[in-house]
Image: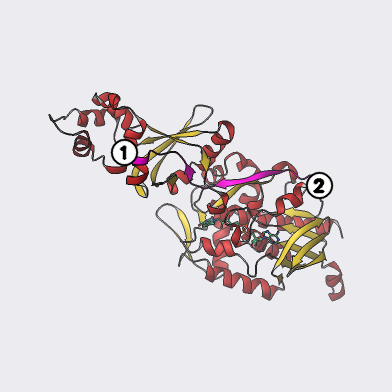
Amino acid sequence: MGMQEAVQKQKTVIVVGAGPAGLMAAEGICAAGHQVHVYDAKPSACRKFLLAGVGGMNITHSEAYPDFIQRYYDKAEWLDSAIRQFNADALRDWIHGLGIETFIGTSGRVFPKDMKAAPLLRNWLKRLRDAGVQFHMRHKMVALSDNQVEFEHVGENITAQADAIVLAMGGASWPKLGSDGAWVPVLSEKGIAVAPLQSANCGFYCEWSDHLKTKFAGSPLKDVAFSFTLADGKKVTKKGECIVTQDGMEGSLIYAFSKYLRDGINDSGRSSLSMDFLPLQSDEQVIKKLRNTKPKESFSKYLKRTLNITGVKTALLHESFPKEVFQTPESLAHCLKAVPVHFHKTKPIEEVISSAGGVCEASVDDVFMLKAMPGVFCAGEMLDWEAPTGGYLLTACFATGHLAAKGVNEFLERNE
Ligand SMILES: Cc1cc2nc3c(=O)[nH]c(=O)nc-3n(C[C@H](O)[C@H](O)[C@H](O)COP(=O)(O)OP(=O)(O)OC[C@H]3O[C@@H](n4cnc5c(N)ncnc54)[C@H](O)[C@@H]3O)c2cc1C
């Protein structure tokens, strides 16, 4: 291709949102030779990505693909094509290409070698700038049409035009980092179906007694298993730990159930889990230990001596059952292995790790182009999927950004 032809072929693309999804889209579109302009409401890129790096950046997961893809629940089939084309191995190779080594932790989670996000981001931004991607910070999208975006920039409204547009404005958790969900009405007003943004990977509220609140708020609940019974009767059980708070529960084990609990609350106003305080012991083993009674021993001492059940676990047991059911080893064992806990609300979206909801599957084609707005693509957490922690969130953000870029490049080629 001659110089003149190359320049003629080069199109202008706007990416709104400088998070991992937007930057991945920008990289793929720039690589096809187009001029990419990335706009973001905040003064700097990838603020949430950087925060994610503070507690140890878990970028993807090493489990086998069939298990991996099921982490996206009922959206697994929808995301399959994107994630297959940019799976955990491809993502790791891409990170290595930025000069950052990765390792697999004991849980199978994948991390950058130093656990941090900042070095990776620094190298990536440099590579993007060197390739010619232009950044326009402090530009907040306020309106959108087929080939034009209106931004608010330091108190003024400006418009920018492009041959294609990628929207990657994230969900609505931690809004102070930039993704505040303000894009929802902009798209909804255009008749684009957007599922409401809701808390995901979140804690939940429940009502504890004053005794539990004053004595045990902040207590960790360790070596327990939680079970949730799905509508079809199947039981989901996971082991782990969480924290009993003043008004509910927080921590990794409860987060892992957040989709099920939230969906249940949405349906009926309430959702319940069953807690097993002795997940490594069978009913029979527990009953056998409980048969070893001593006269005049207090109930709490008896529980501690026979099964090492103490503190918050004993309090939760009293919270859930009347004393009468502790009379026989059989019924007490049954209680210890199935303590119910009821939740009525998710923690606020501002405080949680990620959000569910977003641009619906039916609103986009197979490369995430809005059916109602040809030339406008979506990527990342603003699409209507969710996943647990474990690197699945970032993987889907990168993968959808990657596929949206492919979609943009094909769209531009078709529309030469
Ligand atoms: C505390 C915490 C820890 C996390 N840890 C992990 C982890 O270890 N592993 C993992 O996989 N995931 C983790 N996540 C989730 C992960 O960071 C997000 O899923 C991911 O950043 C979403 O990427 P995104 O590009 O879709 O959106 P975002 O990263 O949210 O980026 C969206 C960008 O769009 C910009 N924007 C929004 N609205 C507008 C607008 N109207 N106009 C212009 N710009 C706009 C925002 O300023 C932002 O820069 C964590 C999240 C949090 C909060």
Question: Would you place residue 294 above or below residue 193 in this image?
Answer: above
Question: Percent from the top left, x then y, of residue 337?
Answer: 33, 32
Question: Percent from the top left, x then y, of residue 177?
Answer: 59, 62
Residue 332 visible in the shown view: yes
Q: Which residue is mark 2?
A: 372
The residue stretch that appears in magenta: 191-211
Residue at position x 64%, y 58% in the image: 21
Front: mark 2 or 1: 1
Q: Is residue 207 magenta?
A: yes
Q: CA distance from mark 2 to mark 1?
A: 55 Å
Amino acid type, label 2:
Ala
Question: Would you place residue 180 above or below residue 128 in this image?
Answer: above
> Which label's residue is closer to the chain start, 2 or 1?
1
Left or right of 363: which side holds 72? left
Q: Which residue is mark 1?
A: 315
In which quadrant of the rendered image does the C terminus lie? bottom right
The colour scheme is secondary structure
Question: Percent from the top left, x then y, of residue 320?
Answer: 36, 32
Residue at position x 80%, y 61% in the image: 149
